[in-house]
Image (cartoon, coloured by chain):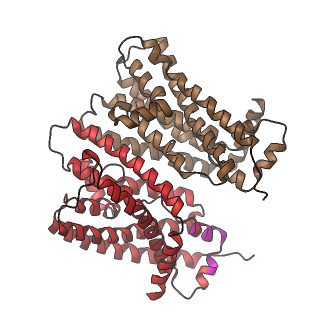
Chain colours: A brown, B red
Amino acid sequence: MKMYWSYLRILFKSIAQYRLSFWLLAVGQSLTPLTGFAGIYFMFERFGQLRDWQFYEVALCFAVVHLSYTLCEAFARGFDTFSTLVVNGGFDRLLVRPRSTLVQVLGSRFEFARVGRISFSLILLFWAIGNLDIAWTAAKVVTLLLMIVSGMAIVAGIYIVTASLCFWTVEGLEIANIFTDGGREMAQYPLNIYGKWVKVFFTYVIPYGCVNYLPLLYILDRTQGSGWLYMLTPLVGVVFLLPCLLIWRFGVKHYCSTGS
Amino acid sequence: MRTYLSVGKLRFIHGMQYRTAAFAGIATQFFFGFVFIMIFVAFYSHSTVEQPISLEQVVSYSWLRQAFLAFVALWFRDSEIFQLITSGNVAYELCRPCRLYEFWFSKLVGQRLSYAVLRCFPILAVTFFLPAPYRLNPPASAESLSLFVAALLLGLLVNVAISMFIYISVFWTMSPIGSTMMIAIVGDFFSGMLIPVPLMPDWLQQVSYALPFRWALDFPFRVYSGNIATAEALWGILIQAVWIVALFLLGRWALQRSLRKLVVQGG
């Protein structure tokens, strides 16, 4: 853990050399979710409601997904760009160091410029909460935090699996975008508006629904029966991370250098 | 003219080699298409008033967008040109016995064309046979089909002409990140990439109609489904042509301006 912080410190110092471009990038990046959200806003303006969902409820859903996704992108960017490390043989260097490969890859990149998107999502989150009439309890606050953390765990898990596949394929796989970018696009709306196969896949295979939709029902008091079950569903996201880490381990063991 | 046609053709053949990459792309396009359509179906299911564009038309619009994404997406770009500019190797390009603007323009057209050709047929073929709400409906009439094809190809030229400004801007900024992002974000929104232009509020529609972006995307796809009638579509194609000429001349002028200032260091 200490090593990770020193990685971050060094990366931050290198970013601080290019201040203007950093701020421009940060502001520019926050525009993408902004236009996405504007799209949702205009759709609601025209249609009034989405099935039984009101605008601010969807806004909350959107904010939570984007927050956890962006946080994860900032932290785990090293895995996203991992294929370059395999292609140019840089991974060999990591292997000879007496530290965990996971921490080293994690520390190899940190996207500070995501601060723009993160703050946009945070503002949106508080704005949505402020406009929703929610009877807050300690349990609900915990649920909300769990949603964000577990969402991060799922995205990180997908990143790690995709990166592990590079051990065999060398090239990165574009198809993984379905699960990261596609998952985000999908999860920004409540899951029950989709067709059945989407719901099943994103609840039981990649559990976006468990960290986003089900606990959201609990926060909005739309559950029937015991709330505890809904409250604890985000933990599925953390469980999802475990097999992903195992695949990584397995990949590292079977790694053959490209020799370049 | 013949030079530029063959540049485009070469780039087209080059792009056709990447078939495996196209498979991954197609899978992604299908997924996104389904998600978008499900969202629209959900929105339309409770709508009591008549919307300016029907659900069937929105579905066609969505699938066509997915199939011809390479025609319409502004974030789709050639990193080779960026590298040429930032590394100074653009000097080699200037030694070629042809005009730089036209050279790059035809290269970009060929590239986008090859991407779209590889991806559009499987997507179109499958989506025609999907069950009810997801099906891509046939074009409204034979006229709208032929007008659609014309509008789509002209739209490709509009889009390439717009994207040329991204490359030109790199001569000044030296970093492709900022300008690409800005133009792509603004352009994708006003072209109707996120939500179809008729579903935007009125004031935003006015803005969008005044800008060139929608002529690449919103216009051809609505001609296909008959949301834009034949007579209006003919006028639209004329306006497309005017935009192409205007953007082309403006871009060529801007490129010449920036080349005059260009200093390439040796080494």
Eyeballing the image, is A243 above or below B234?
A: above
Residue B45's quadrant in the figure?
A: top left
Residue A128 picture quarter: top left
| In this rendering, position of residue B102 left or right of residue B190 | right
In this picture, residue B48 sits left or right of residue A113: left
Residue A244: where, in percent of width, then height?
Answer: 62, 35
Dominant secondary structure, magenta? helix
**Magenta region: which residues?**
B81-92
Residue B104, above or below A240: below
Q: Quadrant of the N terminus of chain B?
A: bottom left
Q: Position of residue B5 (x, y in %)?
A: 45, 83
- Name the residue at 35% across, 34% down: A196
**Of B1 and A117, the residue lying toward us:** B1
| Residue B61: quarter of image | bottom left
Comparing A243 with B66, the one in front is A243
Residue A223: percent from left, percent from top? 36, 17
* In this picture, residue A10 sits left or right of residue B196: right
* Residue B233 horizontal/vertical position (percent): 20, 67
Say if the magenta span includes residue B91.
yes
Considering the image in quadrants, where does the C terminus of chain B appear? bottom right
Q: Establish if A24 lies above or below B125.
A: above
